Image (tube, helix red, strand yellow):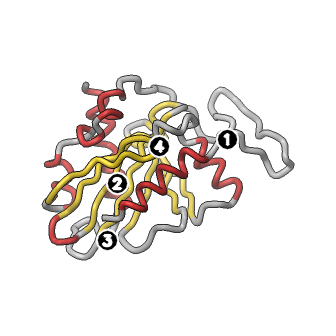
Amino acid sequence: MRLRTIVVLFATAVATSACATSESGHPPPSSSAVNPAGAPKVTNPLTNTSGVEANPCTAVAVSDVEALGGKVSRTTVDDTTAGLACGWIFADGSGSINAGFATGAKDGLGGLYARNASGSLKAFEVQPPVRGYPAVVYDDGLSGSGACALAIGVRDDLAFIIDAQLRLGNRGMSDPCAMATELGGDVIAHLKSS
């Protein structure tokens, strides 16, 4: 498991700010459909996130994670500066998925949009909405083969981050972002049903 990666991802989310500026140095135009950093507004915000914030391993059942990537040998909860993150560690050293709400960052996806605008991300790609919620895949330079960092905006001020770090032997290795997206959909479905 790459604990350092999830800690850095969450810490980076906290360090970013929605106070982005455009190329001209002026704040970007805002509208009812866009947050100040250019992130799309969340039109159907989820408000019942406190249970998963307090215990991120309840975001989905272990069986849901195993259906995507194989046998989970153990779970961990990591206390990061941005919030608690659950780590699902796959058996046979085939990687891990770390996920949780970035509660320490108060700008949702806006921080990542701001970092992209400033050029501090290695990659940034807007994704189709995950069950109606805006999402981005990003790389802050810590990723490699079998890795994907996905952030889903569940409110304008809150994002759920999934960091897949997969290795040989994991069935999701060939497309870790598809695995992260499917898991994100499961998290959204869980939150909507609770």
Does dot 2 land on a helix, a strand or a loop? helix
Q: Residue 37 has which mark?
A: 1
Residue denoted by label 3: 174
Estimate the spatial distance between the alpha carbons at disc 2 and disc 1, rounded to whole Å: 24 Å
Distance between the Cα atoms at labels 4 and 1? 19 Å
Q: Quadrant of residue 147?
A: bottom left
Left or right side of 193 for 113? right
Ranked by sequence position, the earlier of labels 4 and 2 is 4
Mark 1 element type: loop
Residue 163: image location, x then y, percent: 38, 56
Disc 3 marks which amino acid? Ser
| Residue that badge 2 annotates | 180
Q: Amino acid at mark 2?
A: Ala
Q: Quadrant of the N terminus?
A: bottom left
Within-10-Å neighbours for mark 4: few <14, some 14–19, many 20+: many
Q: Residue at x 58, y 36 (%)?
A: 107
Q: Is residue 117 above or below residue 32?
A: below
